[in-house]
């Protein structure tokens, strides 16, 4: 007789094997290679057997996305010394930004799955309840908490509401509680800098900068320094 605990462990082990096989296919062939039949072949299973663990391709991809976001978040958190009250916020920004870039360059296929595919609309049914969405929010909170710390330590100048327009200000104000109570203009500027760094990392990983920069590291450091200066941080100048 198989007890419930043993059965649960066997199921968890099988789920882990399925996700590991899916990741191997992702790395070797990209997102398009991660199909239920391909994963079943990888593990020597029949497709119907796989459906007992993942009822659809979307469920498998969603579970893989959640794992990857959590892996990335853990890697970034490991770079921080959260117990030090005198932590240098400029150094923390550099650690997190470079940590994201390093992870992406080391795991380009995984990065492409997380950041290079369409995200369901927030209005989609049960979207906010999916493991992938929740893991993405945990990842995003790392940067939200950092920018809120920077703001409360030394508020940086930001565009006034009348420059941004009422519609944008209203949307940003709704997010204020997730940014430690920052005003709309400060969130706008933070989002501007985030999309700047995020876009640069994406372009480098997807090979869109080779036409002018064989090695984008120095450009990334210069951009990061410029952003740090705008936020009032004591950041090391690029070498």
Image: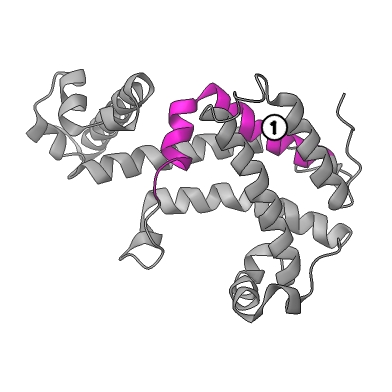
Q: Assign the magenta stretch its main secondary structure.
A: helix
Q: Is residue 130 shown left or right of residue 108?
A: left
Looking at the image, can residue 66 be seen?
Answer: yes
Residues packed near mark 1 inside 10 Å, few (<14), some (14 to 19) or many (20 plus): some
Q: Is residue 99 magenta?
A: yes
Instruction: Locate the C terminus and report the quarter of the image it occupies.
Output: top right
Q: Position of residue 144 (x, y in %)?
A: 66, 55
- In this rendering, is residue 29 above or below 8? above
Helix, strand or loop status at disc 1: helix
Q: Is residue 1 visible in this depiction of the protein?
A: no
Is residue 75 placed above or below 86 in the rendered structure? above
Q: Residue drawn 86% across and 64% down? A: 157
Classify residue 138 as left or right of residue 101: left
Tell me how the rendering is colored: one colour
Q: Which corner quadrant of the image does residue 97 belong to?
A: top right
How far across and down, in percent of the image, does residue 7 sit? 21, 35
Q: Which residues are magenta?
A: 91-118
- For label 1, the residue is 98
In depth, the one of 145 and 223 nearer the eye is 223
Q: Is residue 148 left or right of residue 107?
A: right
Identify the residue shown where x is 48% and y is 33%: 111
Viewer-closest of 48 and 171: 171
- Please name the residue shown 74% across and 54% down the image: 147
Q: Residue at x 19, y 36 (%)?
A: 3
Corner quadrant of residue 128: bottom left
The residue sitting at the front extreme is 211
Q: Position of residue 214 (x, y in %)?
A: 65, 19
């Amino acid at each position: 007789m198989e007890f419930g605990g043993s059965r649960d462990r066997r199921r968890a082990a099988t789920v882990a094997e399925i996700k590991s096989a899916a990741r191997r296919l992702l790395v070797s062939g990209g997102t398009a290679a991660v199909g239920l039949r391909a994963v079943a072949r990888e593990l020597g299973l029949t497709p119907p057997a796989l459906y007992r663990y993942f009822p659809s391709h979307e469920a498998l991809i969603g579970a893989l996305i959640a794992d990857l976001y959590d892996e990335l978040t853990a890697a970034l958190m490991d770079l921080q010394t959260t117990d030090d009250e005198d932590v240098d916020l400029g150094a923390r920004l550099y650690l997190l930004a470079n940590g994201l870039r390093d992870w992406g360059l080391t795991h380009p296929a995984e990065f492409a799955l997380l950041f290079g595919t369409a995200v369901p609309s927030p209005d989609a049914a049960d979207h906010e309840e999916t493991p992938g969405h929740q893991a993405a929010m945990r990842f995003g909170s790392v940067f939200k908490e950092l920018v809120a710390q920077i703001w409360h330590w030394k508020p940086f100048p930001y565009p006034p509401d009348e420059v941004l327009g009422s519609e944008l200000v209203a949307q940003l104000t709704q997010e204020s509680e997730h940014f430690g109570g920052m005003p709309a203009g400060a969130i706008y500027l933070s989002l501007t800098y985030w999309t700047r760094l995020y876009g640069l990392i994406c372009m480098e990983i997807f090979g869109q900068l080779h036409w002018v920069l064989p090695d984008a590291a120095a450009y990334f450091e210069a951009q990061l320094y410029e952003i740090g200066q705008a936020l009032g941080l004591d950041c090391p100048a690029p070498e």
